[in-house]
Amino acid sequence: MSKRYAKDYTLREMMIVAAARELKNGDKVLVGIGIPQLAAILAQRTHAPNLNIIYESGIFGSRPARLPLSIGDPTIVSGSAGVFSFFETFAYLLQRGYIDVGFIGAAQIDKYGNINTTVIGDYSKPKVRLPGSGGACAISSFAKKVIVITPHEKRRFVEKLDFLTSPGFLKGGGSREKIGLHGGGPSVVISTLGILRFDPKTGEMYLDSYHPGVTIDQVKEATSWDLKISPNAKETEPPTEEEIRILREEIDPMGIFLKK
Amino acid sequence: MSKRYAKDYTLREMMIVAAARELKNGDKVLVGIGIPQLAAILAQRTHAPNLNIIYESGIFGSRPARLPLSIGDPTIVSGSAGVFSFFETFAYLLQRGYIDVGFIGAAQIDKYGNINTTVIGDYSKPKVRLPGSGGACAISSFAKKVIVITPHEKRRFVEKLDFLTSPGFLKGGGSREKIGLHGGGPSVVISTLGILRFDPKTGEMYLDSYHPGVTIDQVKEATSWDLKISPNAKETEPPTEEEIRILREEIDPMGIFLKK
Amino acid sequence: MEIEDKIMSAKEAIKKFVSDGNLVCFGGFTHAIPFALGHEIIRQRKRNLTVSKETPDLIVDQLIAAGCVEKVIFSWAGNPGVGLLHAFRRAVEKGIPHPIEIEEYTHFTLGARYFAGAAGIPFVPIIPSVLGSDLPKYNKNLKTIKCPFTGKLLCAIPALNPDVAIIHAQRADKEGNVQMWGIIGSNKEIAMASKKVIVSVEEIVDSEVIRRDPNRTIIPAFKVDAIIEEPWGAHPSYTQGYYDRDNEFYLEYDKLTRTVEGMEKFLNEWVYGVENRKEYLKKLGVERILKLLPKTYSSIPVDYGYYG
Amino acid sequence: MEIEDKIMSAKEAIKKFVSDGNLVCFGGFTHAIPFALGHEIIRQRKRNLTVSKETPDLIVDQLIAAGCVEKVIFSWAGNPGVGLLHAFRRAVEKGIPHPIEIEEYTHFTLGARYFAGAAGIPFVPIIPSVLGSDLPKYNKNLKTIKCPFTGKLLCAIPALNPDVAIIHAQRADKEGNVQMWGIIGSNKEIAMASKKVIVSVEEIVDSEVIRRDPNRTIIPAFKVDAIIEEPWGAHPSYTQGYYDRDNEFYLEYDKLTRTVEGMEKFLNEWVYGVENRKEYLKKLGVERILKLLPKTYSSIPVDYGYYG
């Protein structure tokens, strides 16, 4: 059966589908609300039926009766397989190395995949004070693989972060390993323009694919530094009709997140 | 109402009653099986109705339906107020400093209340291999007050321990505080011959009272070092009729521990 | 000594156990945030508090707006699932109503402070997650240490031992044994770490209910100083099995409190304008309350056995 | 990938996951000691094992007598409520059946090793309780460290990460989510610390039973490699709510195993002489089994709420 690609889909749906495809069956995935959660559920309903979804609030094996509105939504608890305490979640799951994939967002990201979600401007006299790390720093440090979801804008893809909240490859070239972080670091950035990955040697980000309708030049223009482009850079594989159907009809029929 | 002392009682009962009198209402007491448990229950039923009995296995607020045979007896769980894990019991209760009184036994004890329950003879080639510390070392280190229950024999009350399992006042003169133990150390030794306490300055043990029918000389003879005697040393206050009645009729009617 | 009476009103408990200048630690993680107790702190106009909470949520935002707070210890200061905390931002960015000090952590490192506090150790080492970040530049409590076994660099996190822990849970008995289910967060650790512990519960239940299921107890009676029976004490957050999160409330709050005036209006209406939680609930109204009630989904009893 | 089938017999599980020379950690603290799994290790004549258990109890005593053990990691080696462990003593005092190495801790320090192993940190510091004792002379894993905040002396305890954890509990679903009540001991920590996890349970229950009470889960399915439905798998210790501790058995064992011959007799009768736990129970007999059954004393259901 050849794949039938969807013709009608949103950028948000493209990003969800791309994220879902990064997840492998059996993975233990720490998800947040929004795109990560939708991607994980989509993966479960397509190629990864035994994906383990774990919420930062310590819940594993959730079977939510509705689409959860926060990582602490009561619907993720009722009918779940178990609950860890806050400290256990970070120590016994993340630090111990049991999380295969973690998702994080970014207010700013640099070429080594380091991320700022703390502050725009000076830390002591901020222009915009953002929420801060929450679980992101631990996820970036300890998950075997980190997926970054972010809008692609010049003010976000910056030469220098205003504040480093969550470590990517730090200054590249093994500087991450040097401080002793056992997690694999950022594996992929799914932006509103394309999919970016990291050179395993230098730790530097490169464009792997651009979303349908986007040009390489557009991506370069939306990035503050001179972004490397893979010699094999191609168009991102679009969502299939089936993926879009599952998303719209099964996962988010009310359009709570899809229409955001 | 004047106290009516019992005429017919065993040495074991004398020791239980003496231990019970060391417990104050509201104390959180970590008990083991045997004399400590009987003493704690007796205290609850006489002068300390709100004594908190805690078992080393993590159980608090027990209301055992029968006399427990071990610190892990299922009867201490059913109907109790709560259960801590093993690590929580030692970290969140003992190390955190919430235990007011702990009980320990002794195969050997020295004049500073240091205790051996590990080995008789050389550690590497033991004559008799005993169980070891278990919870005793943590109890001795962290409980605000430690009550030692032991037979009084020359081979037990020794000049030098074969092995120091649980710290008393170490070498005396503040050497216990020096290593940073916040527990109060041994408060009293209830032996088969008398009640011994510790000089608050030197940390050395002295005889405070001798059980009815025992002489000071007997106690001195059963102690390897030159035991100090309180100038006010007197006969131990015997059990009252009521205490003996509660012990025999209410607490251990089958004589499981009383007749041992 | 009689069993001391730990059952009291929120008003009595806050009056008795929270003093100006205290380090007050709030429990709850999205679930069971102690709003009723927090509002009482605002009404009693406590001042110069240091407030600790991984996710300050709307309650700490309100405490800041009301001028109760000198310093916030936190790890994620957002409106969960909604956006930012406007009073927190105004205080940090513009010093409104007055400048506040912040002491910032990651979830893991603040959780580690609570853990070390509960365990009675002065610090706990962690794999140096946070050392790759810029946080240690601004937070001197994130130190480095060498592992005496592996020689590896670790991050050392000091214990936190608050003056008062403020917690909401499903139920307790009158002795003060507290039981909870659903997301537990750091409630056990902050209770064990703190000097005083105030707990509001949906229900005070018969001792027998607690004692038929001791493994559900998260805080032993001896660590609890005040028990407040405060149904819906966690609204607009939720109590698992009792009511749902009032998401509309969170969204309305977000809109309303973008201005100082809106924030004032909120406080006057929902905090100063009501005497206690009962009046708050009257104001909330029957319709809204009914909408938040979940259907039943109960656990199946387990047998502990009678060993007599 | 299909859901891998984790349900197997004790024989299969031990064959598949326990190898000669492994570091095997036994769960259970007086409660829920995994005797059935331990006996299977003896029957399969595993050799050169390092066995870790706070209280070795009769099961490690038997493993030693059967010649499976090279080294014991422990903190209290007695027959609980009865006396001493004779095979353990013979091995340590006289090298019978062969000399064994011992690595000795206090309860707290061994529990701390499990905790650090579960938490994924190389060590955990504790207030220097054990530094006042003679243990550090013989156990080089008890090191000292200075607190980077207070400057105070602390004791550093290294993590323990066993090859295999052997655990008994009340129930699990077929995915491997394990639930337990009563005394939990270190079961959660050793499961999270170990590379492989084998769990025997009184009952494999429907997933719905587990999921109606997620807070009772102590080990998540992803950490469990084998689930064995083994009713009475903890006899002569007990499983809360299922059967009582067989105190007579502990007393008889104490008498019988004072001699090497008695110990041989015991092993031949109760371990080698039976094929599996079912046969062991037949040998135990109906009368003894009935005597150990407790009356019912059940928890009251709690409501998690249906949030649809």
Image: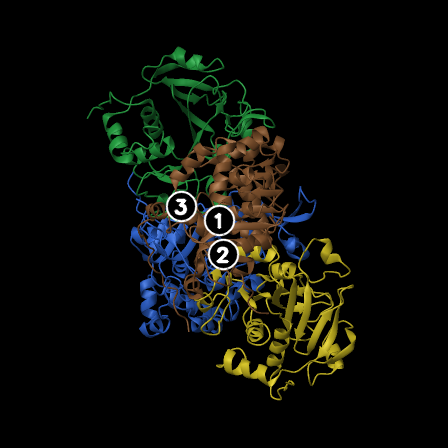
Chain colours: A green, B yellow, C brown, D blue
Residue position marked by numbered label 2 in the rendering: C228
Q: Is residue D205 found left or right of C14 in the rendered image?
A: left
Q: Is residue B156 found left or right of A8 in the rendered image?
A: right
Comparing marks 1 and 3, which lies closer to the viewer?
3
Q: Secondary structure at mark 2?
A: strand
Q: Which mark is residue A70?
A: none
Sequence-wise, the earlier of marks 1 and 3 is 1
Question: Taking the image as drawn, is residue D188 in sight?
Answer: no
Q: Which residue occupies the foreground of this view, B1 or A75?
A: B1
Gap in angstroms between the C-alphas marked 1 and 3: 13 Å
Residue position marked by numbered label 1 in the rendering: C36
Quarter of the figure that contains the N terminus of chain D: top left
The crowding category of the residue bearing disc 1, from other C-alpha atoms within 10 Å (few below 14, some 14 to 19, many at least 20), is many
Q: Chain of mark 2?
A: C
Q: Chain of mark 3?
A: C
Q: Secondary structure at mark 3?
A: helix
Instruction: Check contact, mark 2 vs mark 1: CB within 8 A.
Output: yes
Q: Which residue occupies the foreground of this view, C104 or D121?
A: C104
Q: Amino acid at mark 3?
A: Leu
Quarter of the figure that contains the C terminus of chain D: top left
Name the outermost residue toward the left. A1
Residue B13 picture quarter: bottom right
Q: Which mark is residue C284?
A: 3
